[in-house]
Image (cartoon, rainbow, N blue to C red):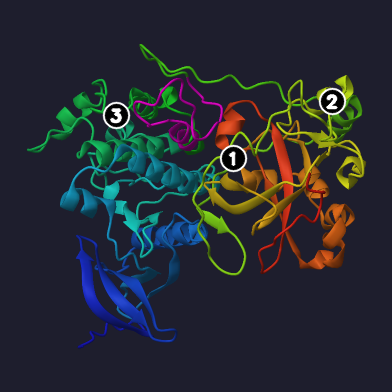
Amino acid sequence: MQFERTGVPGYEVVEVLGQGGFATVYRARQLAVGREVALKMDSRVLATDRDRQRFLREVTAAGQLSGHPHVVAVYDAGVLDNGRPYMVLELCPGGSLGDRLHQTGPLPAAEARDIGVRIADALAAAHAGGVLHRDIKPGNIMIDRYGNVGLADFGLAAMPRPGQELSVTREALTPAFAPPEAFRLAEPTPAGDVYSLAATIYALVHGRPPHFPAEGSLGIAEVIVRHTWPLPDLPGVSPRLTEVLRHAMAPDPADRLPSAAALRDALAAVDLVEDAPGPRTPTFAPTLAFTPTRTSAPTVPQPAAPPTVPESASAARKKKGRLRVSVVAVGVVVVGTGGTVAYQYLPPSTSEASTAGPSASASGTGGASASAQAANAGFGVPTTTEDCPAAGVEGLGGRCTTTAECWSGMVVDVGIVSVNRSDCLVSHLWETFAIAPLPSDGMTNNQKELIKHPDVRELCSRKVLAESRQADGLKIDSSRWTIDVLPPTATQYADGLRVMRCVATVTGEESTGAYFRPRA
């Protein structure tokens, strides 16, 4: 194969992937490590301060966010002797969502919604770091070799600083996805990115941008007028999705969803399952920043009160003065041992996940006393403090499940855990060694946020694990265990279950049998 040399040291070009007005993107090989990458060569020379500032802005913005699972990674950047800048990016052989729309048409609503959740999380990270993207559209959302989506092209990215105005021009806009205030040359804000992402999701489902005809072009004046039109419902799709997008695309920025994080959570809460019998519950249960208006909204179960926490624990938390943590979603992570393993989520059966009721027993041997029933209320399973090291951690309300509780694979998707309940007598990965109410200042079912909470870290500790071992578990050194946190599932959280578990697995192997509690 004939390779083209671009003058970028250490890289050989294989082919042209795409070409635009300002840059050409090549598939290239990074010679030192034999890795295929995307090499973006700017067609302009950095002859002015404005050009240099634009390039620096893009490199800095993209570099700051490269660690996010849904931002296209930047590996390298520089300027050639002739003044032409370049960037070396993660190769995304799947092309862009714009390419996919053009080739295969609209996406299924559920897929578009899930893409929106992931890109909204990337956008929330960008905004938290002081970066505005300003050009979100299907063509700037790339698909990597594993089918994951990532936000790319921070060429228009802005990093506001106090007392510094941002350059605003209409020429750089993509009219079909730009917010209406951009056409009035208003200063860019996070609300503009929220609008553009919502317009992108709408286009992914509808096949073309909102307010734009299937054919023909529009002048700027007509685009501005069309922004004032109501957003049509998406045919055949739950009106709840349109309602979220409508709220995110309000003509007045002050009326929109307040942040990219709010858009992420609102999208994740939309249940797109059609013709499901009875009330439907969201797959993600944040507090929405708005109340969608519908003629026949499904009934969503109201969260029950969290488990009663001893008065001393509440008082101790108030003294600590901890702030409530916010929900931050992350990309898909498969948690297992011995390599990457994927597990399908099947909710625990009613026989495996028995709820504590009038006949539930704290000891597992007969009828429960009134005090045992009160202790189990809100946990969803029988629990005990007898011979339970978790109960000795002061002020956290920790308990142990009455009998052994085991789990197979744990899949974490945008911070939300799906997991299979397993019989402890068959091969499994995880076992519960402590159970407790969610911290009163950390009410979230997002695992990545929950594990940061100091109370959770104190309860799900190697010390508590070591003291919790029973029977054959005493033969396994505590250093061999991997500890994790199992928050309530999205459905459990929506139903009001506010309970977390400390779970552990023997690193590098599956287990058969129970190590922390006796099996009834």
Mark 1 crowd level (few <14, some 14–19, many ≥20, 10 Å Cα) = some
Instruction: Count all numbered tags in the image, as a single digit.
Output: 3
How far apart, in angstroms, are the residues tagged by discs 3 and 1?
29 Å
Give the image quarter of residue 184. top left
**Of the image marks 2 and 3, the number of the one nearer the N terminus:** 3
Identify the residue under disc 3.
Answer: 237
Identify the residue under disc 1.
Answer: 348
Identify the residue under disc 2.
Answer: 368
Residue 240 screen position, x and y as percent: 38, 24
**Span highlighted in magenta in the image:** 263-290
How far apart, in angstroms, are the residues tagged by discs 2 and 1?
24 Å
Query: Where is 332 relative to 290, above or below?
Result: below
| Amino acid residing under circle 3 | Val
**Of the image marks 3 and 1, the number of the one nearer the N terminus:** 3
In the orientation shown, which residue stands out farthest toward the top? 295
How far apart, in angstroms, are the residues tagged by discs 2 and 3?
48 Å
Give the image quarter of residue 241. top left
Helix, strand or loop under label 2:
loop
Say which of 270 and 225 sits in front: 270
Helix, strand or loop under label 3:
loop
Say which of 87 and 354 sits in front: 354
Give the image quarter of residue 86. bottom left
The image quadrant where one finds the C terminus is top right
In this image, 514 relative to 13: left or right?
A: right
Q: Nearer the viewer, mark 2 or mark 1?
A: 2
In this image, 414 relative to 177: left or right?
A: right
268 within the magenta span: yes
Q: Is residue 251 visible?
A: no
| Amino acid residing under circle 1 | Pro
Residue 463 screen position, x and y as percent: 87, 56
